Amino acid sequence: MRACRFASLLGVMAAAYFGLATPQSASAATITFTDSATNAAGFETNFVGVLGFNRWTAMPFIFNDGTYSASGDIFAVNILFNGLSYTYLFGEGVTSSIGAAAPAANIDLGITQIYFTVPEAAIYGAYDVGFCNQAAINAGDTQTGFPFVNGTLLTPVAAGTNCAGAGTISQTWGPNAGFIGNFTNLTAGVDFSFNAGAGPQAITLPWGDDGPLIPGLALDALLMPTGNPLDGMTVDQVETLLNNTCITDPTTNIQTCLTQEVPEPATLWLLGAGLTAIFVAGRRRKAAGPILK
């Protein structure tokens, strides 16, 4: 059920890109937010189209509906190396309840980006690495990811979705082989299931999709789905790493450095229940227990 909802979000967000009356020059990811406790939903985007080759972009996000909040940053990277496409989408931040008492709720976040790509056979994987605070551990909260490439859900390999115990969530998907065309969409959804209990309950959310890594590239340390994918770096450090990433084509010996696409100012809506039918099927209250996948 959750996977179907994220797949529907993919269609809605893609329509938002291609429905623009005037093409934009910059590129950035889009993120959606839904809260079953309040029936609130919203999304933040730069209202732009496709991320070009050897470009990267970053966008901060923040949602707060008075009951739960989510904040962090999204990064999208598109590399053309040796005639092949390497596309990445990842986010970091935290989702938490607000106040001393947390109501039961499912918080859904979904990030998406469309890329120019070279038609080819490609391999993709995904990761979701979460860390729970003590209140989330005590409540037995869970977090489950739903990564897609061109609308196809990747195959789960390892799933550790429950905060109980060590307070660490670790999930991986793929590698999945498939064929990509001139445009490729990466979408990474994550569902947080918070149980009623003492708050604030908080789960961090490094997660995302990635293509094959380029051997020897310094960026690999950032994108490897082991431990914390962001390796404890600040947003400024991530952006510095991206700005300093250069690739030398082994055939032409020409070096190309990644360039940041500067997006338009992001726009944020937090909508009431009457405006969110496209995102929220209805108010959902969750009993304690793991998410059924």
Image (cartoon, rainbow, N blue to C red):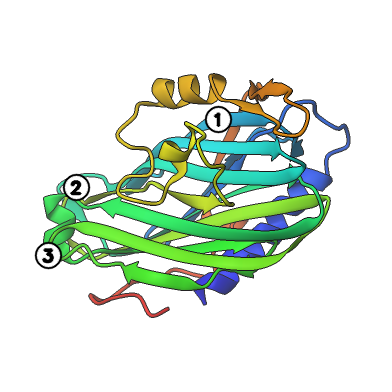
- The location of residue 125, given as percent across then percent down, is 52, 59
Does any portion of residue 279 appear in the rendered image? no
Instruction: Give the position of the C terminus as an image quadrant.
Output: bottom left
Where disc 2 sits, the SS reads: loop
Spatial CA distance of label 1 from label 3 is 34 Å
Quick one: label 1, few (<14), some, or many (20+) residues within 10 Å?
A: many
Residue 141 location, quadrant: bottom left
What residue is shown at x 59% (from left), y 57% (from top)? 276
186 or 181: nearer the eye? 181
Gap in angstroms between the C-alphas marked 2 and 3: 18 Å
- Of residue 158 and residue 245, the one placed in the foreground of this image is 245
Near mark 2 (Cα within 10 A), the count class, few <14, some 14-19 or many ≥20, is some
Foreground residue, 290 or 88?
88
Residue 286 falls in image quadrant: bottom left
Task: Indicate the secondary structure of the residue bearing disc 1.
Answer: strand
Q: Is residue 26 above or below residue 159?
A: above
Q: Nearer the viewer, residue 46 or 165?
A: 165
Q: Residue at x 62, y 40 (%)?
A: 29
Which disc is residue 200 wearing? 2
**Residue corresponding to mark 1:** 58
Q: Which mark is residue 165?
A: 3
Q: Amino acid at mark 2?
A: Pro
